[in-house]
Amino acid sequence: MACWSCQRPEGEGALCEKCGAIQPPRPRTHFEVMGVAARFDLGADDLESRYKELSRRLHPDRFARAETRARMYSLQHATALNDAYRTLRDPARRAAYLLRLRGIEIDSDRTTDGVRTVKAEPDLLAEMMELQEALADAKTDGRGEDVARMADDMRRRREQDLSRIANEYAAASGGSLERIAQLLVALRYYDRFLAEAGAKEHAA
Amino acid sequence: MSALVHISEPGAATAAKSCGRAVGIDLGTTYSLVATVRDGKPVCLVDEQSRALLPSVVHYPADAPPVVGWEARALADASPYDTIVSVKRFMGRGQEDAEVRRRMGLYRFAEAREGLVRFAAGGRTVTPVEVSAEILRVLRARAQTALGGEIDGAVITVPAYFDDAQRQATRDAGRLAGLTVLRLLNEPTAALLAYGLERQKQGIFAVYDLGGGTFDISILKLLDGVFEVLATAGDTALGGDDIDHAVAEWLLEARDLADPATLRAALTAARLAKEHLTHAQTTEALGRTLSRTELERMAAQVIERTTAPCRRALHDAGIDARRLDGVVLVGGQTRMPAVRRHVAEVFGREPLGDVDPDQVVALGAGVQADLLAGAGPRDDVLLLDVIPLSLGIETMGGVAEKIIPRNSTIPAGAKVTFTTFADGQTGMDIHVVQGEREVVDQCRSLARFRLRGIPPMAAGMGRVEITFLVDADGILTVAAREQHTGVEQQVHVRPSYGLSDEEVERMLLESYEHAEADVRERALREERVQAEQILRASQRALEEDALLLEPGERDAIQGAADALREAAEGVDAQLVHQRREDLDRTAAPFAQRRMDAAIRRAMVGQHV
């Protein structure tokens, strides 16, 4: 495509190869936005330095004096970049996003065409309900230590499941998507539990 | 990289002239300041008496222009009703806000218009935006004198925890004061920008900002010139004013609280006593002796209220207090020894003592203004800020569904799709809210609008895609679009505070009308296509089967066809539709005969 500013072919990047003008964003995956391969195993430091480098070039502050069109493109690029980094920096979100790219949605109430939604197994639901009740009781009774202990246990469990997800993705065959989906559904429930527990910890 | 350095460089003069005079403004609850970058260093600009601070006080004399600053503050005790102090606490607030009600004793309110607070002062009515604009005008004039010309742009700071309405109001005040507002910058971020650049610091810092009327806590990561806000929390109705009130009430124990002049005088005495006790152990106020211990007892509740936001910010940032590289104190109220002790306790370390808590925010704003509009390109520094409160939308049952979670880096955007819930539903109410609560009633209502023109469909078939976009100022734009059928419309909504409701209403109406125009245009085009088809078909029929025509029939059909052709050249879709039906009806007997003839021919063919 021709650059809107200098009319020459602009290459594929966010900025024109010839004149440096910012180009309208194309629809891209979060991985493409960050310039990394679509895989689970990504280094946090590498992501962060890529994010900051891209921000330096694309942030609206860089275009404060540019014409309206360039300011608009910069806003769109920076928005997509922030969204990409927020999704990919967090291992659980990254794993869920990889699944979504393959047409699997985690525990969503929304239905989208051509997307399969994976929900919690009854066993997990039953167990989490029990744990939630125990947590609620501990909170009502003001047993702060018990709340903290339950939260610690849950955090450990979350860590374990996260490394299971990493192992699945690392497996030579690419791992079982179904299994990863189930682990991610469980993570959602753990996070809800931790939010409940945390609300108490912060109020204290 | 200052504007002035560049002016002296050959070749750079033109650029410097057009966009060199940029300033940063700290529009505070108690004091306001203006700063700019000179010779690469940010400096606060002073008045003719060399004072950097301008009290954020506006006095409205009857039949004379408003008086701003020190002079106004001196007049506050004598005429409390005509003198507006701490106006920042009213920015973007509706009359019914609890914060406003609580402080009503000291202000005379005019009847609210469109739910916005208005003061009655000096025989006129003014809004908080107008009062703030008076303060900004004085700072703008000061900067013009100091920099020798018109100001090209300003960065104005706001508490990080300001919601969308409060930001809009601040931006409007800047505009009203004749300033080009380059950016609204969060105060703690501004403070760390000034501090970090000055000291060449790296690491993770907490900025604890307790001002006259607002409290902010931000956790920032500073690495290679990128200032990244990890999390922010706070309370926009908590500050030194609250301590003054507690002390004033104590001073007035036995006196009439309802008399505003007395109360205002007591507040002044309370503030002076509080300031004196920063260094002294006891002081006198309105004939009573006040000890530092007694003051701290009265302030304890206010100070304690800062604890929970600090914990939450650390938690949201995912940072343990031990990993912090420093705690920066901002805001005049942090001079109080009890506040410093409290901060040391919460964060497990002594706060940094080498920052001027009054000036550092303005200095940071000056730096950011220079980055955005200064003469020299400078790409070694970048600020990445966040939205303080989640943005969401009301769903079934009054539940607030979060669309953009708090502490998302800005600019931020998100899309969410809702489906229609009733058969034949043609509109959808969209209610935009801000806040952390699950229930809509407990969140801040930012905007309501109705998306119309959804084509009637079965429940669940209509799809409305709602797009949120938060720009680099932290200000939100919402767009809604029905996407299932070919019909598309968009409604852009800017939250209603700050702008008058009429303005918002007008913008909305325009978009509705625009949408209706789109629908009409589309209908017309469809009618034209169909008209063209039937015209072509009837013309062919007249040529092919002229023998089947009854006497006079050709003229009748030709007449109806001409009428349709004429209508299709116009813009009335309804008329095109009607004429098309006329032609259909007129040609129907002829069409029937053609059909019969065709069937007969076919049957004859079969016999052969």
Image: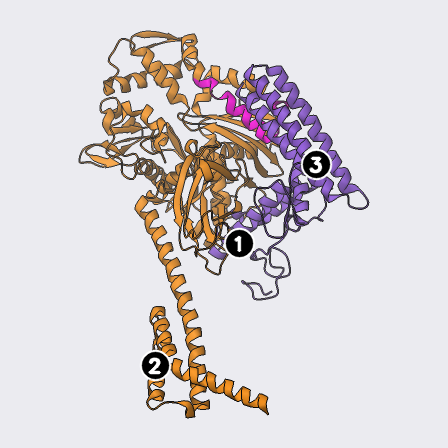
Q: Which residue is mark 1?
A: A73
Q: Colour of chain A?
A: purple
Q: Which residue is mark 2?
A: B560
Spot the residue most to the right: A172
Q: Amino acid at mark 2?
A: Ala
Q: Which residue is mark 3?
A: A183
Q: CA distance from mark 1 to mark 3?
A: 38 Å
Q: Amino acid at mark 1?
A: Tyr
Residue at 66% x, 19% y: name it: A149
Q: Secondary structure at mark 3?
A: helix
* Badges 1 and 3, same chain: yes
- The chain ID associated with circle 2 is B
Choose the circle earlier in sequence order: 1 or 3. Answer: 1
- Residue B581 lies in quadrant: bottom left
In the image, residue B606 above or below residue A130: below
Q: Is residue B553 left or right of residue B316?
A: left
Neighbourhood count class around disc 3 (C-alpha, 10 Å): few under 14, some 14–19, many 20 upward:
some
Q: CA distance from mark 2 to mark 3?
A: 70 Å
- Residue B75 in sight from this viewpoint: yes
